Amino acid sequence: MPTQKFEDALKRLEEIISNLEQGDIPLDETVKMFQEGITLAKLCKDKLQSAEKEIQKIIKDTNGEFQLTILS
């Protein structure tokens, strides 16, 4: 399976959550959707952590220290 974009994975995860909250899905399909949701949640978490690491690299000062930058 090719790597999904974060935004696509999040959108699909939101669809799954909405469908599961309705509660009118057969049990077998519910289990499959739940499993897909867990996979998508992990993918989103991993992508966010990777982005955070990249941002931390970018905001180091010349001494290698992290600088707190408040964005408004």
Image: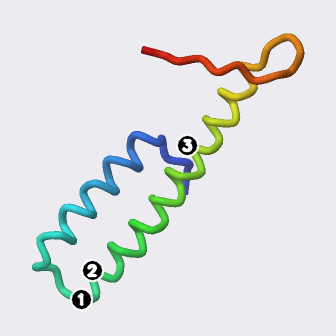
Mark 2 Cα-neighbour bin, 10 Å: few <14, some 14–19, many ≥20: some
In this rendering, position of residue 20 left or right of residue 37: left
Marks 3,1: beta carbons within 8 A: no
Most foreground residue, 2 or 10: 10
The residue at 86%/11% (across/down) is: 62
| Mark in the foreground, 3 or 1 | 3
Q: Badge 3 is on which residue?
A: 48
Q: Which mark is residue 30?
A: 2
Marks 1,2: beta carbons within 8 A: yes
Most foreground residue, 53 or 34: 53
Q: Badge 1 is on which residue?
A: 27
Residue 67: image location, x then y, percent: 70, 19
What whole-number distance in Å separates the C-alpha atoms at marks 3 and 1? 31 Å
The residue at 26%/63% (across/down) is: 17
| Mark in the foreground, 2 or 3 | 3
Residue 8: image location, x then y, percent: 38, 44
Most foreground residue, 47 or 55: 55
Q: Earlier in the sequence, mark 2 or mark 3?
A: 2
Q: Residue 70 carries which label?
A: none
What whole-number distance in Å separates the C-alpha atoms at marks 1 and 2? 5 Å
The residue at 53%/60% (across/down) is: 42
**Vertical side of 35 occupied by 17: above or below:** above
Mark 1 secondary-structure assignment: helix
What whole-number distance in Å separates the C-alpha atoms at marks 2 and 3? 26 Å
Most foreground residue, 20 or 56: 56
